[in-house]
Amino acid sequence: MKYDVILVGTGFSGSVIARILSENLGLKSLVLERREHIAGNMFDKVDANGIRVQQYGPHTFITDSEWIVNFIKKYAEWVPWDVTAKVEIDKKLYTLPFNYQFIREYYESDYAEKLIRKLEVAFEGKERVSIFEILDNRDSDIVDFGEMLCQKDYFPYSSKQWGIPMEAMDRSVISRVKFALSNDNRYIQQRYQYIPTKGFTDFFKNMLSDDNITVKTGTDALPHIKFDEEKQRVLFEWDGEIYDCPVVFTGPIDELFQSQYGSLPYRSLDIKFESFDVDSYQDVPFVSYPQTEGYTRIVEYKKLTNQHIKDKTSISIEYPVPYVPDLNQPYYPIVNAENMELYQKYKSLSEKYHNLFVCGRLGDYKYYNMDAAIERALEVEKEIESYVRE
């Protein structure tokens, strides 16, 4: 056969697995991508202003793991870049993340210092705490502070972002954004923060540029996938051949099985891009808008990616919307007990087929940061190595 492995998707999961299978075992992969470009939601391009914009929302690479940094540097040049941000509350801009600097900006000075001292005592030894840890504290000032954050930011932003009432939202979703017990004004506080010098698309292009990897964009893989129920295997029809080999699927797991148990819900984004003949649109790479109607965030890309272009700038405005297949892209799994129960049905079904490997944000129905997506992809790659050696 011409190919040893079939992979669906050119995001982190599909690209990493294809490349490492080539490097470790010399396996030949066919990688299919439904969209007309590689890199999945990491895709970026240079617009008419000469500014590299990220088509599906803002991304920087963050991790606490040095080995992950060493891994990505094999396929592109990366430079350190700490992103800063602000939030609009009651029509005034404040520092993000929520930290001691935010407290000093929001409250009068004596009360701010009093509250900071209380937080330092209450959470001694911790760097970050969730909003629920703040709300569960016994001190009334700390609780009042947590309730203010919830009412003015966490609750309205999350409800707008996810399109569901707060009482139906899993606590883990809100707990992802933590309060920083410091003056560190970096939006993300991971140890390593990088941007690729030539953009994310270049990184994926380099990873997929291998003699053993064939990439086909603009190709829907689903019509080519067949299920052999008797042998409990997945077959792939391509160019008149039937491939009985490892199949890696990184798309929505429910769509792989024709949504036979019902559709898994996702949130999507309607992202509007605008350009201006000015040097600067806002002070920081992005500003969060929890209280405004419709949109959640405005990103100024040359500040996000450290591009030095004078008198021109490009922004994007993000409007959260429901995911509708064939109309927009699935961005975020909506994690709650009911949806996870439905996901487990599809996961159990996928495990019936010995040569099927489902992974990635859509396949695992789990929101991954980039470093976690790479770790998960490398786990699956090891599983495939074991499979082909049997």
Image (tube, rainbow, N blue to C red):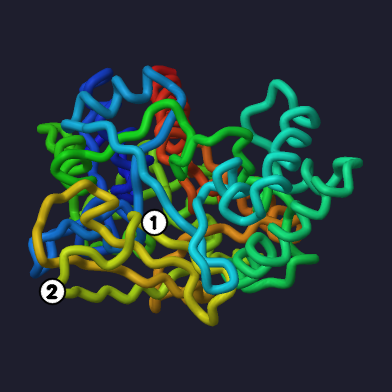
Q: Residue 277 carries which label?
A: 2
Kindly identify the residue that appears in the image at 74 percent across and 36 percent down: 119
Residue farthest bottom in this picture: 293
Determine whether 350 is above or below 155 in the image: above
Q: What is the count of numbered marks?
A: 2
In this orientation, which residue lies closer to the viewer: 24 or 175? 175
User: For the residue labelled by badge 1, is the local secondary structure a helix, a strand or a loop?
Assistant: strand
In this orientation, which residue lies closer to the viewer: 138 or 163? 138
Position of residue 377 measured from the top left corner of the image (x, y, whole percent): 42, 33
Q: Which amino acid does label 2 sit on?
A: Asp
Q: Which mark is residue 225?
A: 1
Q: Which amino acid does label 1 sit on?
A: Ile
**Is the Cβ of the residue at disc 2 closer than 8 Å to that at disc 1?**
no
Does the image show residue 256?
Answer: no
Give the image quarter of residue 130: top right
Q: Which of marks 2 and 1 is nearer the N terminus?
A: 1
Residue farthest right in this picture: 138
Looking at the rendered image, the quarter that the N terminus falls into is top left
In this orientation, which residue lies closer to the viewer: 101 or 242? 101
Position of residue 358 measured from the top left corner of the image (x, y, whole percent): 49, 44
Residue farthest front in this picture: 110
Relative to 84, 44 lies left or right: left
Q: Which mark is residue 258?
A: none
Relative to 172, 364 lies left or right: left
